[in-house]
Image: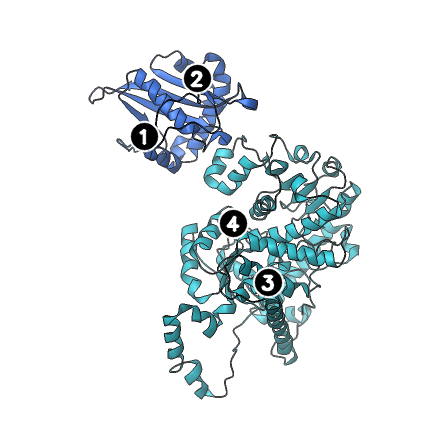
Amino acid sequence: MSASSETGASPGGPSETPAIPIHLRPARAADVPALVPLLLRLKRLNEEFDPLLKVREDAESQAKSVLAAQLDDPKSVVLAAEGVGADKDKVVGFVRAVVRERPFYTPEYEGVITDIYLLPLYRRHGVGEYLLKEASNALKAKGAGVVVAEFPAQNEIAIRFYAKRGFRPIQLLHARPL
Amino acid sequence: MAESTAAPVDDGRPARRGARARRSAGTRGEGQTKALGRRAVALSGFYQGKVETVPKVPVRSLRDFALWYTPGVAEVSRRIQADPELAFDLTGRWNTIAIVTDGSRVLGLGDIGPQAALPVMEGKALLFKWLGGVDAVPLPVSAKTPDEFVRVVESLAPAFGGINLEDIASPKCFGILETLQQRLTIPVWHDDQLGTAAATIAGLLNALTLTHRSVATTRTVLLGAGAANLVTARLLLALGHDPTRLTLVDQHGILDAERDDVDELMLRNPWKYRLALRTNGGGRQGDLAAALVGADVLLAASTPNPNTVRPEHIRAMARDPIVFALANPVPEIWPEVAREAGAAIVATGRSDFPNQVNNSLIFPAVFRGVLDARARAIPDEIVIAAAKELARHAADKGLSPAHILPTMEEVEVFPHLAAAVGDAAVALGIAGRRRTHDEFLERARAIMGRSARLVRALARARLTPAMPSVKSLEGRNEP
């Protein structure tokens, strides 16, 4: 999977090739040390939106074990985005997703994107869209009939990002502390 | 005009002090500031306000009110209703601005609220009148959110020819200014951003000339990423500074696209976030010391502490470095310490050292200029035009390491600055009144001159009581 290979049109728009090229590939165990700080950055960003998303003290070791487990899980998709040029071999972003069964609805399986993160310099160049598309394809290959994005309710940037790409809210998660 | 050019009231600088005070300026400065504070309280109690409304028309008898008020005034209103632009000809709107604050970041006092901000806004209004001939109305407002603040200012706009935002906390000041600039058709200015940045740029341009540098090839470090420095960075980029040779440093160190807090900045301070992505080419990381290695210029606008910048930091800079230490009332490094460490040119925010970077050099003339041009906005081009004109006047008098900016005594600069601003508005096509350079200049001289004469005439006529001694006031046993 490479950004320069043509992989089809995004919904409602022309086909996208990221202006800053990246190389996207399935993450490997050796990527975990590079993925952990990116995952933590995303969770700390989520923390900004809601106190109920406060990052745990042990988040770092959690990130390590969760990622390691997911890499071996056939229901999971973890893609690592590598930079090119000076950033070659550097992981500059990732997407993490999992296929879940929907026992009462059709389609029977949903692919849930739990994380998409890119380092700031790689944003706004169509790379995020490319990550979304590749993750969707991988989830579809694993049997998902619908792709779902999970993010903080107050994250307006994510709301706009997904809305532009044909996503709409189907279920809400309302919370109160106990 | 301005005989007394001691410390501008607007930013807490201590008054002019003798050279003797410099050596131990730290402790002495505190004592001096305290003494000034006591006098200010006593005199505020005596005068009970610094500006008042004074008639501009003759009143021979009550009968004149048939003209100034009803019934005659109704026709004036009808004319304005038919042609709103006439408000600028038939009322004082052409020369009246509002000084609006929410009191969220007043001087070095922090969030003291609108009521306590009033004396500061009064002082600013006095400066506007005295230096720029501008009728400025102090308007602290209770507005909790930026949206609420914007709505309040929008609804005030019909009464004013311009808006001066004052002492609003960063970063909300950026969004407020941007939104108001988009929505209003009168010029909106935030002095803590634009005034300070323009004065900084003016001094810097001359300092670069003196040390045979150019903006395009200079490596610059900005210490402090608040209202002033974020705009200084923006203006530098507009002037052709290479973004990769620009490095911002704040309390967390070098601002970089991959710094840990960069996502938080994206949400809370997109202005700083954008600079984080563009600047610091080569991805330097670390603290101020790391940023300054090999740098040509340091522009510090951070916290008042003379040990913020160390001599070894200066020694690590390029040859003949330029150091602006602009924190008030105490600079980030004392000028003599910076010079001993090799700084070729040093500027501070204080009037008792050479090269005072003072926003009072900028804002009165900028408003004189935009009001006389009836400019619909104050884009960065105007800010830069003002900075360049200020720099040119210092250069005309001869540049030296101790003279890169005009002093507040050089009052002849103000009308020229106003004319340059007027010219820029005309050239940009945003002037409602297209005047020639000489017309702008003469008009500014006349209005500014009248204002100074007015203040003196009021004093001569004893309508403004002579300034009493503080001792006599404190003996009076009043609050």
Q: Nearer the viewer, mark 1 or mark 3?
A: 1
Can residue B235 be seen by looking at this rendering? yes
Which chain is home to disc 1? A
Numbered badge on residue A152 = none
- Quadrant containing the N terminus of chain B is bottom right
Question: From the viewer's perspective, is B234 left or right of B71?
Answer: right
The Cα–Cα distance between marks 4 and 1, rounded to whole angstroms, is 42 Å
Residue A69 location, quadrant = top left
Can residue A115 be seen by looking at this rendering? no
Secondary structure at numbered mark 2: strand
Task: Please state which amino acid type lies under the numbered disc 1.
Answer: Pro
The Cα–Cα distance between marks 2 and 1, rounded to whole angstroms, is 23 Å
Q: Colour of chain A?
A: blue
Residue for badge 3: B364
Residue for badge 2: A25
Q: Earlier in the sequence, mark 3 or mark 4?
A: 4
